[in-house]
Amino acid sequence: MSTELVVSVMVGLGLGYGFDRLVGSTPWGLLVGLGLGFAAGIKTVLISADKMAEQSAGIPKGDDMPDDIEDE
């Protein structure tokens, strides 16, 4: 999930930098690209975390183990 966040931020920075080079609005395109990339990365991480939580919803977490079994 951290890779998704980093890639989203880097893509946003790249697009913002490219926009700055085309228009000459340094550093505003870079800053806007950074913000949008960060927001997209956070959204992607939250979606991935939600999918992982749904997949592990049916897996028992150990509360259903009998009391007479002790950890070794």
Image (cartoon, rainbow, N blue to C red):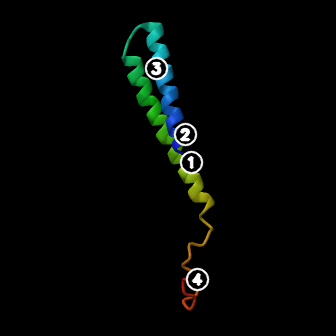
Quadrant for residue 33, please give it: top left
Look at label 2 and name its amino acid.
Glu
- Residue 55 horizontal side relative to residue 15, left or right: right
Of residues 10 and 60, the one nearer the viewer is 10
In the rendered structure, are the residues bearing label 3 and label 1 in contact, judged by CB atoms less than 8 Å apart?
A: no
User: What kind of residue is marked 4?
Assistant: Met
Label pair 3/2, CB-CB below 8 angstroms: no
Vertical position of residue 15 compared to residue 9: above or below: above
Structural crowding at the residue carrying mark 1, measured as other residues with C-alpha within 10 Å and reported as few (<14), some (14–19) or many (≥20): some
- For the residue marked with disc 1, what is the amino acid? Ser
- Number of numbered callouts drawn: 4
Are the residues at dot 1 and dot 2 in contact (C-beta closer than 8 Å)? yes
- Element under label 2? helix
Query: From mark 1 to mark 2, how far is it between C-alphas?
Result: 9 Å
Where is residue 20 drawn, in percent x and y? Answer: 43, 13
Q: Residue at x 36, y 16 (%)?
A: 27
Q: Residues within 10 Å of mark 4 (few under 14, many from 20)?
A: few
- Gap between marks 3 and 4, in whole Å? 54 Å
Which comes sooner in the sequence, label 3 or label 2?
A: 2
Neighbour class for label 2 at 10 Å: few (<14), some, many (≥20)? some
Which numbered tag is attached to residue 65? 4
Residue position for label 2: 4
Separation of disc 4 and disc 1 at Cα?
30 Å
